[in-house]
Image: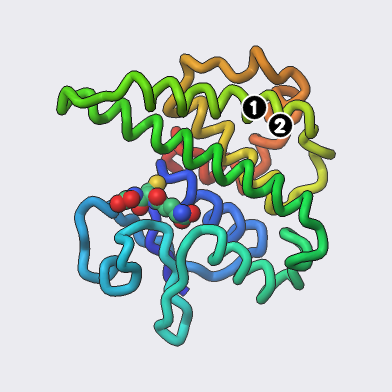
Amino acid sequence: MKLLCSAPSPYSRMVRIMVRYLELDVEELNTNPLDNGDTLLSANPLGQIPCLFLNDGAALYDSEVICRYLDATYAKSQLFGEPGLDWHAQCQFSLLKGLIDSAVKLRQEQMREEEGVRSAFWTSRFEEALLRGIRELERQGAGSSDRINARSMALVCLLDYMDYRHPALEWRNLAPALTLWFEEVRELPIFRETRPDIVC
Ligand SMILES: N[C@@H](CCC(=O)N[C@@H](CS)C(=O)NCC(=O)O)C(=O)O
């Protein structure tokens, strides 16, 4: 299999972590989606990464679909759990995905500054969603540090991305238990090897 992805992308990272956890043979092809390369655009009309090419040439996107595919095909859906059985767990995963979306949109808002069109309204809306979300994640608890699943993978993607792109938000001040959990799990090889600030 081949994966179009990039190191800073938290969505790509979710897939890269799962590939390592499941010890799969996947070639990672560093891709900047803004280059509008033919390979990406012909596989994903959205022009977004990650995009996974299966061995038969078929393409899958987005990150959640790819991860659910890998989990169902190689891990009997143990990482996500069976679809539809635990709606609360699915809602918790959606919260994480939504927070990653808010963090990426906040980054995009910051990049607009060069064009002089940065919106104070959207900037604070994304920041507030992130801070509310972190409080909720602290309330939910991160679970045991020795139990890795799709939720803990997404949680590490979110928190490392916050440190990488939004250090001024200082999420740790709102989440002492999450901080302790994060400091322990982020050193696991699957997380360390895929950290956005570390080029291995
Ligand atoms: N919902 C998608 C979001 C993917 C996404 O937004 N990827 C970014 C890179 S971090 C991208 O390709 N951006 C280019 C664009 O949106 O045009 C997923 O979960 O895979």
Q: Amino acid at mark 1?
A: Ile
Q: Which one is in front, 154 or 147? A: 154
Residue at label 1? 134
* Extreme-left residue of the structure: 115
Q: Is mark 1 within 8 Å of ligand 1?
A: no
Residue under the image location 24 percent in, 29 percent down: 112
Q: Amino acid at mark 2?
A: Leu
Check disc 1 and report its element: helix, strand or loop: helix
Whether residue 117 is situated above or below residue 28 in the rendered picture: above
The tag on residue 137 is 2
Measured in 3D between alpha carbons, the distance from the residue under mark 2 to the one under mark 1, in whole angstroms, is 5 Å
Pinpoint residue 183: horizontal percent, then vertical percent. Answer: 69, 27
Check disc 2 and report its element: helix, strand or loop: helix
Pinpoint residue 139: horizontal percent, then vertical percent. Answer: 78, 27
Residue under the image location 48 percent in, 44 percent down: 10
Residue under the image location 55 percent in, 28 percent down: 130
* Extreme-bottom residue of the structure: 56
Pinpoint residue 99: horizontal percent, then vertical percent. Answer: 55, 37
Q: Residues within 10 Å of mark 2 (few under 14, many from 20)?
A: some
Whether residue 151 is situated above or below residue 57 in the rendered picture: above
